[in-house]
Image (cartoon, grey):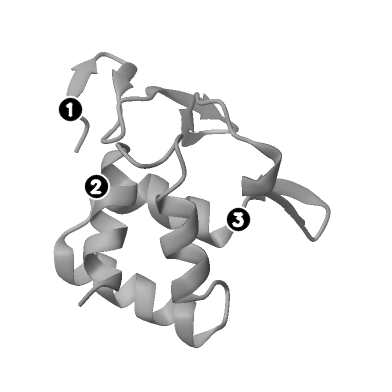
Amino acid sequence: MPDVFDDDIFLDGNGCPTERIHVGGQDVIVHWDDIPDRDLTVLHGIPCTTALRTVIDIAPNLEASQLEKIVQDALGRRLFTVEEALERTSEDDMVKRPGAQLLRHVLRR
């Protein structure tokens, strides 16, 4: 759940401004953050974050068992490696990010 909630605008578990919008009758959650090119990819023509960045971003909103399952699934599907994840979560822009800290904890088990 969000740390701070004010109607449709709140801060997510990583402290990023987030808003709930409605598109075509669907609720959509939009997170606002500076995302470096290395965390971006294109899948079937749709720009999105890499699997690793997505795991980092959602980690604070998951139960520990859910995060472990997601990490094991991503590793099993070779979406990223332990080494890649440890390297990325140790970079200056990630080292204090809550999701990166949680991911590092899971990977070191």
Residue under label 2: 61
Marks 2 and 1: CB-CB under 8 Å? no
Is residue 14 shown above or below 38?
above
Residue under label 1: 3
Q: CA distance from mark 2 to mark 3?
A: 18 Å
Rendering coords of residue 77 (x, y %) = 54, 84
Tell me which numbered mark, 1 or 3, is placed earlier along the sequence. Answer: 1
Residue 50: image tag: 3
Residue 48: image tag: none
Rendering coords of residue 84 (x, y %) = 52, 66
> Residue flagged by tag 3: what amino acid is it?
Thr
Q: How many marks?
A: 3
**Residue 24: quadrant of the picture:** top right
Q: CA distance from mark 2 to mark 1?
A: 10 Å
Which-is-in-front pick, marks 1 and 3?
3
Q: Residues within 10 Å of mark 1 (few under 14, many from 20)?
A: few
